[in-house]
């Protein structure tokens, strides 16, 4: 059996680093990445190029010295976003993408888009400049069942946007359904990130035998057939699918609550778990594409120049059950099985 795998340094194409004490606590766990697309849903959100530049500086200040991580910033699309500011921030190398949250879809998305016609000029400017649109693909219509919101979003929102804006490059973020996988496979100029936790859990993990708040995330994990479709897509070698952990730390106090918030904190262990999933699927030879090559290619970037190694050992990999952030604790995602892959940095 393959016990050592040398791969290009991985990137993360969907990462939440938060701000202030939480940023200081979680950023070091992502320091070994090559690049990461940083989500802009702070309070208040990162909506202008100047705000993105300031946030990037706060991230760099929170990282140890001589780390490999290069944060790639995004703007939070609002109905008031100025196309000229987006183009200028991209031309100056401040941002790599723009994020679309339907209003109310997830954590801190109250400023998101309600009327998609109002963001048409921004989307057209982005299509012209080749700036990708990262999409949180769920409708927020209360009449739509939460397990159907991704599939309905494709028909009601995503397909009309793409038809109206030819050439717009779209990343369907954290795809969670067989419908999403099929939609991404059917088109051009579209890719998708897949999280590690959606490769591992289905909705039973959240709900059977007692509610498990640390498995609750958005989009919510779906039934097993959808998880299998995600594993198939991730391990298929199709370059349209790539890593986006959506590692999304929240204080335990806010998750273990009568109204617990959405997000899994996977920064400390996502890569080891991914190696396990690919090994189980007999696809270790395709892991590098998923973690280190496909996303860069979609964003028009070269792979990272350096490498890491994943080594399979008899003793399971270890990570803290929880970390501290200011006066809070944050629980690390528990895959529910031992993981034998360990990371060795070749740099
Ligand atoms: Zn996210």
Image (cartoon, rainbow, N blue to C red):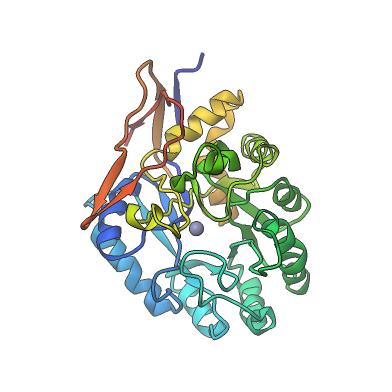
The residue at the point 70 percent across, 38 percent down is 225
Residue 346 in picture, x, y percent from top left: 33, 32
Q: How many marks?
A: 0
| Quadrant (top left, top right, bottom left, bottom right) of the C terminus | top left
59 sits left or right of 306 in the view: left
301 sits left or right of 265 in the view: right
Asked whether 126 or 322 is in front, the reply is: 322
On screen, 221 above or below 308? below
The residue at the point 39 percent across, 38 percent down is 269
Residue 83 in picture, x, y percent from top left: 56, 83
The residue at the point 44 percent across, 46 percent down is 214
| Visible residue check, residue 289 | no
| Visible residue check, residue 33 | yes
Residue 94 in which image quadrant:
bottom left
On screen, 225 above or below 255? above
The residue at the point 54 percent across, 30 percent down is 277
On screen, 338 above or below 327? above
Residue 267 in picture, x, y percent from top left: 39, 45
Residue 265 in picture, x, y percent from top left: 40, 48
Asked whether 187 or 101 is in front, the reply is: 101
Asked whether 223 or 269 is in front, the reply is: 223
């Amino acid at each position: 059996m393959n016990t050592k795998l040398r791969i290009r340094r991985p990137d993360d194409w969907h990462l939440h680093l938060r701000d202030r004490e939480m940023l200081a606590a979680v950023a070091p766990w992502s320091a070994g990445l090559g690049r990461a697309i940083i989500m802009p849903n702070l309070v208040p959100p990162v909506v202008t190029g100047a705000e993105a530049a300031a946030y990037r500086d706060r991230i760099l200040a929170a990282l140890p010295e001589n780390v490999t991580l290069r944060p790639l910033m995004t703007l939070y699309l609002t109905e008031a976003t100025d196309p000229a500011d987006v183009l200028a921030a991209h031309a100056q190398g401040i941002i790599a993408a723009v994020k679309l949250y339907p209003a109310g879809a997830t954590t801190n998305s109250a400023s998101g888009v309600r009327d998609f016609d109002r963001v048409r000029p921004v989307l057209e400017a982005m299509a012209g400049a080749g700036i990708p649109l990262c999409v949180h693909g769920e409708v927020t219509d209360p009449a739509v069942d939460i397990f159907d919101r991704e599939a309905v979003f494709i028909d009601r929102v995503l397909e009309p946007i793409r038809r109206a804006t030819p050439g717009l490059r779209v990343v369907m973020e954290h795809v969670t359904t067989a419908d999403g996988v099929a939609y991404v496979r059917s088109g051009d100029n579209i890719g998708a990130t897949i999280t590690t936790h959606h490769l591992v859990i289905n909705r039973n993990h959240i709900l059977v035998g007692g509610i498990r708040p640390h498995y609750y995330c958005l989009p919510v994990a779906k039934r097993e057939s959808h998880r299998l479709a995600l594993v198939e897509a991730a391990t298929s070698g199709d370059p349209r699918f790539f890593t986006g952990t959506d590692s999304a730390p929240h204080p335990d106090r806010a998750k273990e609550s009568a109204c617990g918030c959405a997000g899994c904190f996977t920064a400390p262990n996502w890569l080891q778990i991914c190696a396990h999933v690919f090994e189980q699927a007999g696809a270790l030879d395709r892991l590098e594409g998923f973690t280190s090559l496909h996303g860069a290619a979609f964003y028009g970037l070269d792979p990272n120049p350096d490498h890491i190694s994943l080594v399979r050992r008899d003793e399971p990999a270890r990570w803290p059950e929880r970390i501290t952030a200011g006066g809070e604790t944050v629980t690390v995602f528990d895959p529910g099985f031992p993981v034998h892959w360990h990371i060795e940095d070749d740099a």
